[in-house]
Image (cartoon, helix red, strand yellow):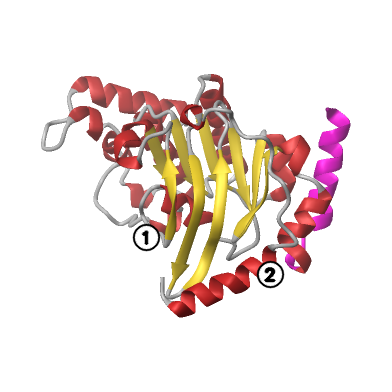
Amino acid sequence: MTTSTTSAMRNVESDFSTTVVKAAKPIADPRQSPVVIRALTVAYHRKPVLWDVNYQAPSDALIAIVGPNGAGKSTLIKSCLGLVPTASGQVTFWGKSYAQARSRIGYVPQRESVDWDFPVSALDVVCMGRYRKIGWCRPVTKVHRDAALACLERVGMRDLAKRQIGQLSGGQQQRVFLARTLAQEADLYFMDEPFAGVDAATERAIIEVLRELKSQGKTVICVHHDLPTVPEYFDHAVLLNMRVVTAGPVNEVFTPENLRKTYGGRLTLLSEAVDAVTRASIVR
């Protein structure tokens, strides 16, 4: 790293030294964890975006990554998948590198990052999720096409399988990308704002699929912005603001105090989030 980057990161460390709280106790053996992040630092144009991030994900869990805009939530996912360069640190999946474990990992990007004018159908997109099983430059056989159709069925999109993706609504496009990820038959799923800009029906369909994945022993890590729904949708949370403020079971770490440490004065919906935490505590 350059001298200016190192200096900037030292300033970040000083700023956050009083706000970071102890995370929940990690899994004893990191090799059993779907993802372990150690001392991860990412900088764009010599400006730190993530600083000394450490996290160990539990298995069989729905995990929300929450934090203010610019906190590095999407960058955290992309750096785990090798989509952005890192300044330092290490990420392992079941004790292996991403290259060794990539067949077990699925990814749903933000909708805005996709070229929806590309001339492919919904079914074509989902079949792309089968390429690791099909093999490159090989035709999509009936077995894989049927598997892709079954994934579209799970998200309520089978009837629109032949529709060009650009002709679908935002919610329908998100369902198609979710189906593509399901077609990978992964064990760990990263999803970048899967609920953003979707209608209520699509949101319900997505959370039903996520819960089904968890029941199958999968782990799902989502960047999520709607704080009031965190206690309802997720069982673990990572509160992030350039570093991990705290992480662990929602009923332990998703508290008004930790939310204030994460968002500071920039959180306009803090009262709604606090109400959601209170209601969840009463239900439990």
- Amino acid at the residue labelled 1: Pro
What's the magenta bit mostly, secondary-structure-wise? helix
Q: Which residue shows up at 61% across the image and 43% down it?
A: 64
Q: x and y percent of residue 210 in the render? A: 54, 31
Crowd rating for badge 2 (residues with CA inside 10 Å; few <14, some 14–19, many 20+): few
Q: Could you say which disc has been placed on residue 111 in the image?
A: none
Label 1 environment density (alpha carbons within 10 Å; few <14, some 14–19, many ≥20): some
Report the residue marked by disc 2: 15
Q: Earlier in the sequence, mark 2 or mark 1?
A: 2
Q: Which residue is mark 1?
A: 85
Question: In the rendered structure, does residue 269 fall within the stretch colored magenta?
Answer: yes
Is 105 one of the magenta-colored residues? no
Q: Residue at x 32, y 28 (%)?
A: 148
Q: Quadrant of residue 9?
A: bottom right
Q: From this view, report whether residue 131 is shown above or below residue 225.
A: above
Span colored in magenta: 266-284
| Residue 198 seen from this side | no
